[in-house]
Amino acid sequence: MHEHHEHHEHHEHGPIARRFIAALLALIPLLTLAALSVPHFEEPVPLTQAAASASMYRPAVALWLSTADHRYKLASQPDIPMGAADASPADIVIEADQTYQTITGFGAAMTDASAWLIQNKLSASKRSALLRELYGPPPGLNFNMMRLTIGASDFSAQFYTLDDLSFGQTDTDLHHFNVAANLPDLIPTVRTTLAINPGLLIVASPWSAPAWMKTNENLIGGELLEQYEEVYADYLVRYLDLYRRYGIPIYALTLQNEPHFSPITYPGMPMNAETRARIIGNYLGPKLANRTPKTRILDWDHNWSHPEEPLAVLSNPAAARYVDGVAWHCYEGSQHEQGRVHREHPDKDTFITECSGGDWALSMNGELLWFTRNLLVTGTRQWARGVIYWNLALDENHGPHLGGCSVCNGVIEIDSRTGEVTRNDEYYALAHFSRFVLPGAVRIKSNDTDAEKGIANVAFRNEDGSIVLVMVNIRTHARRVSVTQGKNRFEYEMPPESVATFVWNPEPVVAWVRRGLEWLGPGRLAQPTVQ
């Protein structure tokens, strides 16, 4: 959550008034130009541009479109004139004054495989351009969230943790703790993304404790020995400390990736709700409680199909006091379980921390519609504050990987022979949100039209007042859709199997004044502080 601090100071009214009048005088030419002609950019930022033919007092709707047949890929379309709302019914009714969760952002996991491809298969110039495209501000994708693995996952070149020892040895003081495996590729890549987007929020998850802490002394299978539960908490805290020394702050931790599953081809470690609650309540929670900046604890980090697992942890008072939210994966169950858990614990945040597309039978027609509708639209309607896809980048062979998923796709594909970058359907699905729904936006009320009309939708309001509406037409025929928001109304014919993002500002004059103030800058206009 963002914290807002108000500074209380006293100022003389004379200088403030003079500066305000000067600002208004400076804005007159700007507003006059805005009324006569509105600039149109090849790569527009997600702020509504009023159509030249429309009244300055009636906003126009900017539109970006993608289609499942790939004819359109996040393509900017002509602005839609906004009309006055009347008594006629509308398909989608937006109520901007009814708000829900605040959005932290969207992104993908920087797995070992992704970092290795970015560092080793791209030239320095291509690497810089790609990361700026993905993490830079609009018209970049503006990715604001990332997931890291603590040790190896199935998308690593080798199995490892951060404190590996010879068989039979132990290291309860963690003298051998190190991130040497992350130094060549992962840490430099993450540091570069943070330089591009310093507000990047990173969620970190372990796939396994070191083998010497486990019942079978193996990274594959086995559970955490109870005698090492506090040491395991220390292991996670040591990770936070060492990564911070490398300039990488961790926004949130999960205790264990997919704790309801024991993989047989890559590291994993089942961990039931009782164990998670005990470790959080007795060890990890107290160790993190007074740290600044805060690192949040997210429970579960597994599928929608078992809401009883996070509910069990949240029913434990000793653990619940330290749990900030619940992390979900998309591979089994219903997104509506997110809503169920939220309703029972409205003080806990909701995040989707993993979901992967792949070349499986159900994705023969591409995955643009599924990911936009099922993961992003429905996921945020069911209270997700952030959505993190699985691998950011994989190669033409769905790797590099060692065990696990052999057909997974990344957000992008990097050809291991040529370095050519291909943007997959997941890239465009995420971009329809991340480029326009900015960190700090709030979800606002819109009626659910998915089941009845075959048009999925979700709406947000950015901090600058602009409204963002994302719609998905899953039908194979075009559908004309009407939208009202306050005193405004517009209509649009959604192409078959398409995704559209609409952006407008209900108060265009206010938007232009705000732009003028931004143009003047703090050095040109000293603004009074809140009294």
Image (cartoon, rainbow, N blue to C red):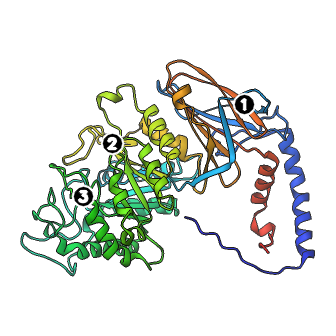
Q: Secondary structure at mark 3?
A: loop
Left or right of 483? Residue 36 is right
Viewer-nearest residue: 337 or 92: 337
Q: Position of residue 142 (x, y in %)?
A: 53, 51
Residue 63 drawn above or below residue 204: above
Left or right of 4? Residue 357 is left
Q: Secondary structure at mark 2?
A: loop
Report the residue marked by disc 1: 490
Residue 473 drawn above or below residue 205: above
The part of the image, by quadrant, that contains residue 367 is: top left
Measuring 13% from the left and 70% from the top, which residue is drawn there? Answer: 212
Cα separation, mark 3 vs mark 2, equals 21 Å
Of circles 1 and 3, the one toward us is: 1
Which amino acid, mark 2?
Tyr
Of circles 3 and 2, the one toward us is: 2
Total residue callouts: 3
Q: Which quadrant of the figure contains the C terminus?
A: bottom right
- Within 10 angstroms of label 3, few (less than 14), some, or many (20 or more) residues? many
- Within 10 angstroms of label 2, few (less than 14), some, or many (20 or more) residues? some
Q: Is residue 248 visible?
A: no
Outermost residue, left direction? 168
Left or right of 475? Residue 108 is left
Whether pointer 3 and pointer 2 mark residues with C-beta atoms closer than 8 Å, the reply is no
Report the residue marked by disc 3: 152
Viewer-nearest residue: 393 or 42: 393
Which amino acid, mark 1?
Phe
Indicate which disc residue 331 carries.
Answer: 2
Q: Is residue 296 visible?
A: yes
Which amino acid, mark 3?
Ala
Q: Position of residue 222 (x, y in %)?
A: 14, 60
Measuring 81% from the left and 72% from the top, which residue is drawn there? Answer: 528
